[in-house]
Image (cartoon, helix red, strand yellow):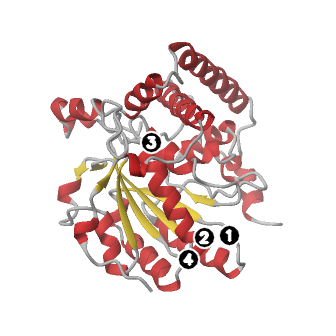
Amino acid sequence: MERYVGIEEFKLNQVLDRTGEVTNSHLMPDLTKEQLITIMERMVYIRMFDERCVSLSKQGRLGFYAPVAGQEASMIGSQYVLEKDDWILPGYRDLPQILFHGVPMSQLFLWSKGHTLGGQMPDGVNVTPPQIIIGAQIVQAAGVGLGLKKKKKENIVVTYTGDGGSSQGDFYEGLNFAGAFKTPTIVFVQNNQYAISTPYEKQTAAETIAQKAVAVGIKGVRVDGMDVLATYAVTLEARKRAVSLNEPTLIEAVTYRYGPHSMSGDNPKLYRSEDSESEWIERDPLHRFRVFLQKQELWTDDQEEQVIEKAKEDIQTAIKEVEATKRPSINDLVENMFEK
């Protein structure tokens, strides 16, 4: 069994720099023009989805919501690799991934509002309800991976958490289990620099999250999480390794959230400077991929506007459906808990 021991290997993998120029052609994924356009469409869609969800939350029409603007590349790039029968065990910020994995938008809104129907995933959609407890889904993902291995499935499980989740006990336990039992598991950490208000450097002495894979003898990879092509490439490699060798991978995507940690009272202006935010806005994942596609004449302003309008229509339809859904009662709570 190959062991991964040197922290010097944890360089930042990148395909596109902040100006949309290719910096590493060797890592460039083999994607068709249609696939490249689809990825851009999804990123634009999610940026509008996020904008509208923030607005709906302020209006009191949604419940808990964790903004995702800035993290589209890490979310869309990693999910686009997956096949239908792969599993996703999400955290509470990972609504975009499970939306494109088959969970209806209206159900995501029901989950946000705490409705009992929100956690009842559709048949054939391999997704668990978004986990609120920080990092708890990582241990579960190792178990799902073991189940896939025992059933000899050529599928994987990917679970997501943030940099704060990588400081939890469940994180280490899950990685250790996946490594010891060689399960087809990807643990994808979106390092958005802050665990709510705690900056990365104050929660761990480790220079990178990826190097934490060394302790459990598995592969660790670090990627520019603002670069959708690099994110896709490293996740694809990790998926192939999981399927062919039953080897887990820890991926650290270095990214940033432009908004607050959640719409439940967080104020990022209290712990982030305008200079630091400006630096990350210059790395915007949509801008760099947009420029890359425009140079190949694959993307126009009209295409982008069409996606934005489609997102607005879908969101309006979904929220109307949710608001017309019967609210759960106390009796419903009992009926959902017990057979009799």
Name the spot of residue 9 as percent of width and height, x first. 27, 67
Query: Which corner quadrant of the image does residue 155 belong to?
Result: bottom right
In space, the residues marked 2 and 1 are separated at their CA atoms by 6 Å
Tag 3 and tag 4, C-beta contact below 8 Å: no
Front-lying residue, 334 or 308: 308
**Disc number for residue 245:** 4
Label 3 environment density (alpha carbons within 10 Å; few <14, some 14–19, many ≥20): many
SS for tag 3? helix
Badge 1 element: loop
Task: Report the Cα–Cα distance between label 3 and label 4.
Answer: 25 Å
Q: Are marks 2 and 4 in contact (CB under 8 Å)?
A: yes
Give the percent coordinates (x, y) of residue 271: 20, 40
From what the image shows, is residue 155 above or below residue 122? below
Give the mark count: 4
For the residue carrying disc 4, how many other residues have a C-alpha within 10 Å: few (<14), some (14-19), or many (20+)?
few
The answer for how far apart the CA atoms under marks 1 and 3 are is 25 Å
Q: Identity of the amino acid at label 1?
A: Glu
* Marks 2 and 1 in Cβ contact (< 8 Å): yes
Residue found 37% across the figure and 44% down from its top: 15
Mark toward the start of the polypeptide (1 vs 3): 1
Q: Name the residue beneath numbered marker 2.
A: 243
Residue bearing mark 1: 154
C-alpha gap between disc 2 and disc 4: 6 Å
Q: Where residue 68 appears, x then y in whole percent? A: 44, 38
